[in-house]
Amino acid sequence: MDLVSFFPQLGGYLYVIASFVIALSVIVAVHEYGHYIVGRWSGIHAEVFSLGFGPVLFSRVDKHGTRWQVALLPFGGYVKFLGDADAASGKDVDAMADVAADPVALRRTMHGAPLWARSATVAAGPVFNFIMSALIFTGVFLMQGTTRDPLTVDRLVPLPGLQTELREGDSLLQIDGVDVPSLENRTAFATFRDSVPEQQPLTYTVLRNGQPEEVMGPYPWPPHVRGIAPRSAASDIDLQPGDVITGVDGTPIFAFDQLKRAVESAEGKVLLLNVWRAGEEFEMALAPRRVDEPLPDGGFATRWRMGIAGGLAFYPATETVGVGEAFGAGTAQVWGVVEMSISGLMHMITGAISTCNLSGPIGIAETSGAMASQGLASFIQFIAVLSTAVGLLNLFPIPALDGGHLVFYAYEAVTGKPPNDAVMRILMTVGIAAILSLMMFALFNDIFC
C-alpha cells in the first residue's frame, strides 16, 4: 500500500474511532451520572466518577469529596462508592469493617445504606439511559414535526427522465383515480399503495390554490435512496442518499418495488445497478445480503436486501407537534427499541435468526462512523438507540451488571438479609466471565460474520 492511498484510509479509520468514542462517552457519562446523582441524593458517598479505564489523564476533586477523572481507555466508565472494592461494586470488606461501629459513616457507604437507597442508585444508570433516549427522540419529533394530513408536497425529489407537473403546496386527493386516504389510517394507506398502478406517468388529482386540478406526475415511490443502512451491501459500494437506481442488469426501473423484487429474486447474485447521481449516470456492482428483518408481530423474517431506505417522489410537508405528543412518541420509540432488542435476542437464542446479528465493538464503531457521515441528526438518533440498548443490557440479571445487583437486592428484600459474601464473590466472578465471553463472541462476529 502506498502512502497516497494509506492516508485517506487512515483518516477514515480515525473518523470511525472518533465517532465511536464520542457516542460511547456520552452514553457512559449519562449512565454513570445517573448512578452518581441518585446515590448522592440517597446519602451514599461517591469516591470516584471515572469516564474511561486505565491511567488517569485528568482529575479533580469537587466540594463533595468526589474525584472526577478521565482515563486513557474510553470504553466505559464507573462510579466507585464508599465501601466498594472495585468498579463492579464488590464489597471492600476491610473498609466496611473500619466503619462498622460508626452508624453515620456506615450509612454513607454503598453496602451500609438502606435497601431502597442501594436499589434506586443501581437502577438509576439504566433509567437515565432510557430518559436520555426518550428526550432525544422527543427533540427529533419536535424538530421534524408530523406529516401533514392530507398528504402535501413540500419539495420535489430530483428524478431523471420525467418532467412532473406536481408543485410545492399541492395536496394529493387522488392518484390515477384512487383516493388518497388519511395518513392516520395506516391499513387504508397500505391498501392505497397496493392499488396505485405500477406505471408512469400517472394522473394526480391535487388541491391547488383551493381548487382541484389534474396534473401528470411520476410513480409515487421511486427507487430513490433516502438512507443507507450501516454495514450493508449499499454502504460497501458507497451508494449515497439522493442516488436514484434507474436500472438493474440492463432492465430500466422506475419503482422502488421493482428494485426490491430484483434484489430478492437475485438471491445473493451480484447485480449491476444503473445509478443516477446529480445529473450523472454510472454503473455499480452490488451483491445483496441476507438480513433478518423485524416483523410487525414481533417475529423476524430473513430476506435478501441491499440496505437502502426509499420514500415518496417528494418530501411531504410537515406540521409542528406539541411537547406532550412528541414526548409520547419519543417514549414509544424507546419502548419499540427495547421490544425489538428483546425479540431479536430471543430469536438468536432459539436459533430462529443468525447470531451474526449481535455486534461487538468493531461493528458498533463502524455503525457510529456510518451514522455520523450521514449527518448530525442521524448520529444523535443513533446515540439514542445505542443508549437504550446499553440501558437494557445493564438490566440483564447477570452478576456485575446493574440487573445482577438488583436481583441480589430482591433476594435481600425477600429473605431479610443479603447473600453471603463468599457466594457473592463467586457469583461476581462468574458474571464477569460471562460478560467477557459475550464480548469475545460479539468481537468474533465482527471479524468473521
Image: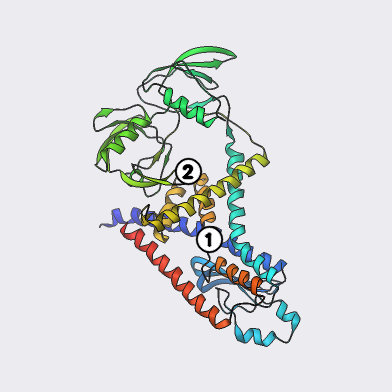
Q: The N terminus appears in which quarter of the rendering?
A: bottom left
Q: Quadrant of residue 92?
A: bottom right
What residue do we see at 72% from left, 81% from top?
A: 105
What residue do we see at 67% from left, 41% from top?
A: 324
- Evaluate whether residue 95 shows in this view: yes
Q: CA distance from mark 1 to mark 2?
A: 34 Å
As displayed, is residue 23 above or below residue 196? below
Residue 395 x %, y %: 55, 62
Give the label, 1 or 2, closer to the camera: 2
Label disc, if present, on residue 297 of the rendered structure: 2
As displayed, is residue 132 above or below residue 187? below
What residue do we see at 61% from left, 72% from top?
A: 411
Q: Nearer the viewer, residue 78 or 182?
A: 182
Residue marked by disc 1: 25
> In this rendering, would 415 be left or right of 182?
right
> In this rendering, would 356 be left or right of 139?
left
What residue do we see at 42% from left, 65% from top?
A: 439
Residue 240 x %, y %: 38, 40
Residue 314 x %, y %: 47, 27
Q: Nearer the viewer, residue 224 or 113?
A: 113
